[in-house]
Amino acid sequence: MDWMARAIACLKDGKAPGGDGIPAEVWKHGGDNLFSRLHQLITNAWEAFDTVGRTRIWQLLRTYGCPEKFTTMIEALHTGMMANVSVGGEVSESFGVTNGVKQGSVLAPTLFSIFLSELLDEAFRDMGDGV
């Protein structure tokens, strides 16, 4: 959470809000409580992301205009994905992984952002403008 505090501290007061529509002063005034809640939200959303069926992720890519050839390549990267668990030097048998994205993949944060954006759009679809 230190990186969030440092990023928020760098925001300049009196400037137009960013894409989120929240002025810098609100972020700064929120302090540790806001940082803690934001961190918890991101962590919970990331954990939930691992349970999302991949079909939904591929649909979102297409909805947002990702080229079909690229979407198909990402799907192929995740097809037949296998994993195992290692505990105390013991390694489990391999098993198929059908949800979420490859851990450590450079695509994972981008796919997560697309998923989270859709989640937030859905959650706030019926809300009016403003904070």
Image (cartoon, rainbow, N blue to C red):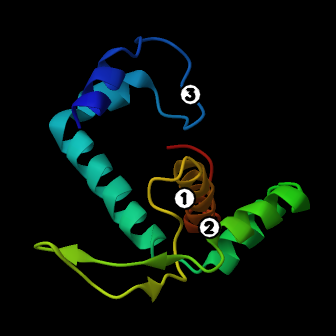
Cα distance between the residues tagged 2 and 3: 20 Å
Disc 1 + disc 2, Cβ < 8 Å: no
Q: Observer-nearest residue: 114 or 67?
A: 67
> Around disc 2, counting alpha carbons within 10 Å, would you say few (fewer than 14), some (14 to 19), or many (20 or more)?
few
Q: Observer-nearest residue: 106 or 120?
A: 106
Upstream in the sequence, badge 3 or badge 1? 3
Name the residue rendered at 30%, 18% in the picture.
Answer: 9
Q: Amino acid at mark 1?
A: Leu
Look at the numbered disc 3 and give the secondary structure of its residue: loop
Which label number is shown at residue 122?
2
Residue on which disc 3 sits: 18
Q: Amino acid at mark 2?
A: Glu
Q: Position of residue 122 (x, y in %)?
A: 62, 67
Instruction: Please identify the quarter of the rendering in which residue 119 is found.
Output: bottom right
Name the residue rendered at 29%, 25% in the picture.
Answer: 28
From what the image shows, is residue 89 above or below residue 128? Answer: below
Left or right: 67 with respect to 100?
A: right
Instruction: Please identify the quarter of the rendering in which residue 84 is found.
Output: bottom left
Which label number is shown at residue 116?
1
Name the residue rendered at 66%, 69% in the picture.
Answer: 57
Q: Position of residue 120 (x, y in %)?
A: 55, 60
Q: Position of residue 62 (x, y in %)?
A: 82, 64
